[in-house]
Amino acid sequence: MDPKSSPLSAPPLNPEAPIVPSTSIPKNRDFLIHLEAYLAKRDGVDKLLKISRYATKFILASSVLPSNLPLTDRLKSFESSVGVSRKAFRLGKFLQDVNAFRGLSFTSPAHFFLALIAYGGEGLYYFVEQFVWLGKAGLIDKKHLSQLQRISAWCELIGYIGSVSLKVKELQRISEDEAGVVSNIETAAVGGLARLADGEKLRKLREKKVLKRLSIAQDLADALMAVADIRDGKGLLSGKLLLSSAGLLSALISTHKNWVSC
């Protein structure tokens, strides 16, 4: 879940409102400048590490490399080290969820409840992950790691349940706005009036709809991995190849979202 977004907090688009071009992020940015800005962010580096980790897990799970190959052992060591490194990026990250929740404008009691589940669950997940990192780093006795990781996984799963629920509702709102704009375009076409503003609104709404669907897919993939963590990698839908594929999918989607918003 993206802590910087506020699901359902934005009012419906007004079809009559003029389009104001955004000047904050140039469309044609120099690639290296864009990359520098991306890597300057905590999430930018974290998502690249996530791609590296799950791409490695996918290679190992697919049995492409023989188990007795020295490269296989190096990849296992790399994957484990990257996993620990990523946890260091969770330090203080729970504050993003706290501030995002504080900044929401609740439209109904149901919205408040779902937002509390989404941001509260994810915030607790990031908070507990700080202690998981301290345990893996050796500062906290490792005998507590198993319990901490289980608590972390449960918090993460609860957060994704709330996040997906909010995003589904947001997707419904976007579809309603899209239908309104389409209706305006059809009405204008009958009257022989072409409105470029409506066409631009429709394009932006459809782009937003695609990104929202991708975000839901990402949350579902991460939720699948959280369930596997809760069950210690046992049971249905806990295969290593499936989980590594879900992790890689989530990493690619989140990297794309962060790149576009950077």
Image (cartoon, rainbow, N blue to C red):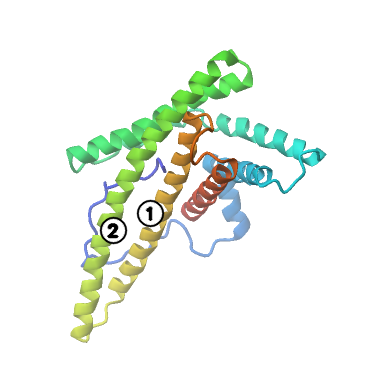
Element assignment for label 2: helix
Element assignment for label 1: helix
Which residue appears farthest toward the front when viewing the image? 235
Give the mark nearer the N terminus: 2 vs 1.
2
Residue 227, percent from left and from top: 45, 35
Look at the image and tell me in which quarter the N terminus lies.
top left
Which residue appears farthest toward the bottom when viewing the image? 192
Closer-to-camera residue (98/57)? 57
109, above or below 178, in the image: above
Left or right, 59 with reference to 11: right
Q: Residue tagged by mark 1? A: 212
> Exactly how many numbered labels are in the figure?
2
Residue 95, percent from left and from top: 41, 30
Residue drawn at 53 percent across, 20 percent down = 146
Asked if disc 2 and disc 1 are in contact, CB closer than 8 Å, the reply is: yes
Residue 42, percent from left and from top: 54, 39
Q: CA distance from mark 2 to mark 1?
A: 9 Å
Image quadrant assignment for residue 135:
top right
Residue 79, percent from left and from top: 66, 37
Residue drawn at 25 percent across, 72 percent down = 182
Residue drawn at 36 percent across, 68 percent down = 203
Please tell me how crowded label 1 is: few (under 14), some (14-19), or many (20+) other residues with Cα within 10 Å.
some
Q: Residue tagged by mark 2? A: 174
Left or right, 153 with reference to 140: left
Left or right, 182 with reference to 260: left
Q: Is residue 95 visible?
A: no
Of the residues shown, which amino acid type is indicated by label 1? Lys
Left or right, 152 with reference to 75: left
Of the residues shown, which amino acid type is indicated by label 2? Ile
Which numbered circle lies on residue 258?
Answer: none
